[in-house]
Amino acid sequence: REKVYLEQLLIDLESDRVTGERGVASAAAVDDAAGKLLAALQDGGDAADIGDAELARSVLWAGYAYLPQGNTTTYNEMISTGALGHLKNPGLKRAFGEYYGRLSSGRQWDGLMREEQIAYRAAIRGLLTRDQFAWARRNVGRPIDATSAPADFDRADFLERARTRPQIVDSLRSMGEVQQRMREDSSDMVAEAEALAARIKAELGRP
């Protein structure tokens, strides 16, 4: 029975590794969008190298957050059934406790990021029309032709209105700090999941 649980934990850890990689990639993409929006807002010119389509999409994308969550299903089952206490390797048992304990403590950033998202959404409210917002949502994460843009997007008017809202810049910077921590947590998840998986494979006598 122990082997069955360990095999299932390997599946969970592979899922965690993929989740962590997605978290790192998402943070990089969101940072890129936030950087473009900040550049346009703070540039004396209109950041001409940033197209209208990219600018409009960045308004929405900059406020996105991917909250990586580890898969604790098998570990929780092992605790509830008492299987964890029957592991033959005490060092491995301790490693499980440390790994899943860190996953749990990392959830404290979820609430903070959601608060920052709410503040950002309030700051950008009304900058895009309903149709423009829907366009941005459809195109988040997709390649965009540099010449395409949402309907009736007036760049000069958009920037003029956005620059009267200093809370946008404040919110982007605050979210950037939390995104950095989440990027680090995601990177740690990848490394720790790989390390724990290697220990399980060694316990099972697998390469």
Image (spheres, helix red, strand yellow):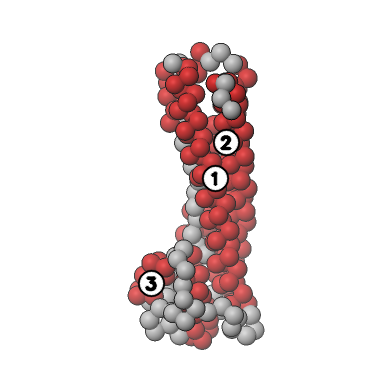
Residue placed furthest toward the front: 207
Quadrant of the snapshot with the C terminus:
top right
Question: Residue 200 versus residue 182: which sits nearer the camera?
Answer: 200
CB under 8 Å between callouts 2 and 1? Answer: yes
Q: Which residue is mark 2?
A: 193
| Residue beneath disc 3 | 135
- What's the distance in space between the residues labelled 2 and 1, CA to CA? 9 Å
Q: Are marks 1 and 3 in contact (CB under 8 Å)?
A: no
> Mark 2: which secondary structure?
helix
Give the labeled residue for mark 1.
20
At 62% from the left and 39% from the top, the residue drawn is 191
- Given the image, on which type of amino acid does mark 1 rest? Gly
Query: Foreground mark, 2 or 3?
Result: 2
Mark 2 neighbour density, 10 Å: few (under 14) some (14–19) many (20 or more): many
Specify the label residue 170 is tagged with.
Answer: none
**Quadrant of the drawing holding the N terminus:** top left
Asked if residue 57 lies left or right of residue 89, the reply is left
Task: Identify the image quadrant of residue 201.
Answer: top right
Q: Quadrant of residue 149?
A: bottom left
The mark that comes first in sequence, 2 or 1, is 1
- In depth, the one of 164 and 50 nearer the eye is 50
The three-letter amino acid code for the residue at tag 3 is Trp
Residue drawn where x is 44% and y is 79% of the image: 148
Which class describes the residues within 10 Å of circle 1: few (<14), some (14-19), or many (20+)?
Answer: many
Vertical comparison of 110 with 36: above or below = above
Position of residue 11 relative to residue 160, above or below, is: above
Residue under the image location 46 percent in, 72 percent down: 144
Rendered location of residue 69, percent (x, y):
49, 42
Could you classify mark 3 by the number of other residues whose Cα lies within 10 Å: few (under 14), some (14-19), or many (20 or more)? Answer: some
